[in-house]
Image (spheres, rainbow, N blue to C red):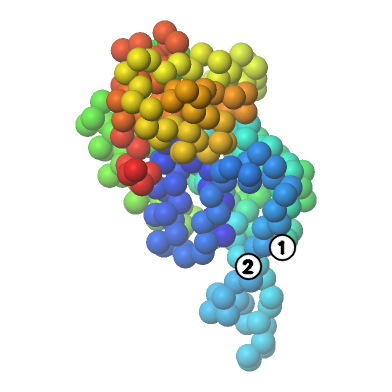
Amino acid sequence: MIICFSGTGNSLMVARELQGVIGGEIIELSGERLRNPAAEVLEVPDRTPQTLPEIAPGLKVPEKEDVVWVFPIYAWSVPPVVANFIRRCRMKGAHQARHFLLCTCGDDIGRADDVWRNLVGRRGWLPRSVFSVEMPNVYVCLKGFDVDPAEVEARKLAAMPARVREFVAKMRTAPAESWVVRGSWPWSKTHIVFPIFRGFLMSPEPFRASDACITCGLCARECPMDNIEMRDGRPAWGKNCAMCLRCYHRCPVQAISYEAATDGKGHYACPGLKND
């Protein structure tokens, strides 16, 4: 089972690549699943007979599929909506499964793997390997943060499939280790910078739609939190925002801004999402 949260499609692209190697179902976290994680019971399926260890001729030990979590790193930590889902979701068979993390990041993850392991461990589940996959930068809401140049974006996307296969090779040995890029000052980024980011830099209030808006409603239809509604033909943001920036990057006329923070910033084509 692959459980995936994706804003601009990078993590979904990785999840699909992973699915092509190990199979299994992709459970996308969006809409009601994110807003009310306890409303639905997910079930980790049994592993196929071909993968079960044999303890006697014809006798297999019942086990559950591995659970692989795939999501982007937010300011060197776990996205709040994903952390809330892990804390509150109901998952039958989760205690009998091994849990892995394949996270996406623009550069480095700090100590986000420790945060994930703590969240999973508190549920009584078994956290195992963690891998990070470098993907194109999408965060543009602070000074100094912008999308990657085209050549850097292309390099990251081209390298992704091999990185996913490397993860699968490590995953099969199942150690509780991390193969990640931590960057400088990893503890401080995760435990000092992230709480500031979460407390002061995740408000949806600065989102605006300029007069260039063509009232297509794509931002409202694709918001993973269903947090955008069209009022008099223009998007209006509610308070329940994942800060994934899908609305900003997917706008076909680039009419959405985050007040002045996104002035002059680039847009990501979101190749991991289906075109509307």
Residue sitting farthest toward the bottom:
57
Q: Tags 2 and 1 in contact by the CB under 8 Å rule?
A: yes
Q: Which mark sits nearer the N-terminus, 2 or 1?
A: 2
Q: Which amino acid type corresponds to the residue marked 2 in the rendered image? A: Pro
Whether residue 122 sits left or right of residue 102 in the image: it is right
Residue beneath the point at 71% across and 57% down = 41
Residue 45 at x, y = what percent? 63, 67
Whether residue 25 sits left or right of residue 165 in the image: it is right
Quarter containing the C terminus: top left
Residue 99 at x, y = what percent? 63, 53
Quarter containing the N terminus: bottom right
Residue beneath the point at 53% across and 79% down = 50
Q: Is residue 62 visible?
A: yes
Along the line of sight, which residue is nearer the eye, 82 or 254? 254
Compared to residue 115, the image places residue 261 above or below, namely: above
Along the line of sight, which residue is nearer the eye, 261 or 216? 216
Q: Which amino acid type corresponds to the residue marked 1 in the rendered image? A: Gly
Whether residue 35 sits left or right of residue 143 in the image: it is right
Residue 153 at x, y = what percent? 29, 33
Q: Which residue is tagged 2?
A: 45
Label 1: which secondary element? loop
Q: Is residue 74 visible?
A: no
Q: Which mark is residue 32?
A: none
Q: Which residue is tagged 1?
A: 93
Label 2: which secondary element? loop
Residue 116 at x, y = what percent? 64, 39
Compared to residue 54, the image places residue 265 above or below, namely: above
User: Badge 1: few (under 14), some or many (20 or more) residues near its Cα, within 10 Å?
Assistant: some
